[in-house]
Image (cartoon, rainbow, N blue to C red):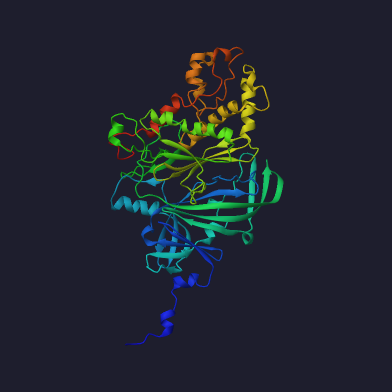
Amino acid sequence: RKKVPEKAMVEPSKYDKLFKGKKYETARGGFVTVHRVDGKVYLEYPLKFMGRELLLAATSTASSDNSVCTNGYKENTPMHIRFTLEDSTVQMRKVNAVVATKSAGERIDRIMEQNFSDPVIAQYKVLAYSPDSLAVVFDMTGIFLDEEAALSPVPKGSGLMEVTKSLTKDLSSIREVKAFEDNMSVKSQLVYKYSITYDKARVVTDQPLTVLATRSLLLLPERKMTPRVSDRRIGVFLTSKSYISDEGVPTERYSYANRWWVEPSDEEAYRRGELTEPVKPIVWYVDPAIPEKWRKYVKLGIADWNIAFEAIGFKNAIVVKDYPTDDPNFDPDDIHYNCYRFVASTRENSMGPSWIDPRSGEILCGDVISWYGVVTLLNKWRMIQTGAVDPSVRCPVMTDENMGEAMRYVAAHEIGHTLGLMHNFGASAAYPVEKLRDPEFTQKYGTTPSIMDYARFNYVAQPGDLEKSVKLTPPLIVEYDKFAIKYGYQVLPNVKSADD
């Protein structure tokens, strides 16, 4: 028997050399394996997913200054990318999801390839193959640690305020890696110096800022939701598209309505008109940072949208839960969790952004951020707008019940945004002013036909109207809201495409 030299028996592979003698952490999921080695991030990316479409997104998890960077804030639209293997390199390509064609054939394929191909935006050297040769390993630290504009967690500012920043790379570091069934995440501590300019006059210069950022890479499913072409008469957020005709006519612009993928679990029962639970409900998790006395009202505001879904045949379409305490994998910044958060800030506002699948307009993740200053704002609104007729609000601090009712209104409004609905400032013009002093009318319809309006509280009411049971607060979910949900979410028979 031929003797094998001892040196040949112990020679490590390129894969082993990457990790041998080093301190490293590995996270394995059904999608990719992530290694954190000596402050670097290595992706072990399966060959079977080369070419598949992905979203790469960033969220601010924690910040040393929430007046500049709010935890839970999503500054940028996710990057729509895919990886391709070219010889010994992995190329990251930006996916062209805007221009499409309904035709097939060599000529139209050539037009698309020549004019609308996916551009290369980054390149990574293949450092090794996995032991089973089914995946390649490459160093992707830069995208998680450098200041990539599309993945920055720090807002640029808005209105007259502009924020400029510079990353101190030698003070920044990779803190954690996670991997799941169809996504992975990397948490980075990013150290900045920032300046703020108000109306072109710089007032804050070279201030320190430390942000814990979560970057997520999500594998988009091969099966896409059937899009629903938008209609300008319904105010929804849009995913813009352009269509190239096979006849060579100029591009046609159109858009998809952004909406969740809500399908009946029992299609036959749904068609018979029976209330049916969805295959996948929209689950919301409520931040324990919200004081308990108001948390129940926030939950009611979220669940109020079930009124509109029940009108089109769905029960329990929206489910509300507390943050789980027994799930080690729960992360409010994971793209799979929809979270309603409270942020310790004097800012008097709330917002409800969402991330979507750019191929179809499917909403994949929603978040609501409510700054603590919204309590002050609601106090002022309620007292100023209804104090003339309601003695109970003539005070600097409202009762828990009055504040709870106002918080419920804010929650329902923001959840409406995460369902795809834009503001409807014209809604209240549909109600004659005299109806706002009508007890029967206001008890049934409130102050506006849409919770997405800015109608606020009933400042039309006069002294004595409260005693007649005139309603002073906004409605729950009303006529326009029900119609908009029906337009976006009712399941239509025999629909296989957007054209249908």
Query: Relative to residue 29, is residue 163 drawn left or right?
Result: right
Res 417 seen here: yes
Query: Quadrant of the rendered structure where residue 251 is?
Result: top left
Q: Residue at x 56, y 25 (%)?
A: 456
Give the number of callouts: 0
Q: Is residue 139 above or below residue 189?
A: below
> Residue 413 placed where, x, y %?
51, 31
Q: Is residue 58 above or below residue 9?
A: above
Q: Is residue 37 above or below residue 424?
A: below
Task: State the residue in front, 459 or 467.
Answer: 467
Task: State the residue in front, 161 or 283.
Answer: 283
Q: Is residue 234 above or below residue 81?
A: above
- Quadrant holding the N terminus: bottom left
> Residue 341 placed where, x, y %?
55, 40
Q: Residue at x 55, y 24 (%)?
A: 455
Can you name the residue that lies furthest to the front here? Answer: 326
> Residue 175 placed where, x, y %?
56, 58
Query: Quadrant of the rendered structure where residue 370 is?
Result: top right
Res 233 seen here: no
> Residue 34 placed where, x, y %?
47, 60
- Quadrant holding the C terminus: top left
Query: Relative to residue 345, is residue 445 drawn left or right?
Result: left
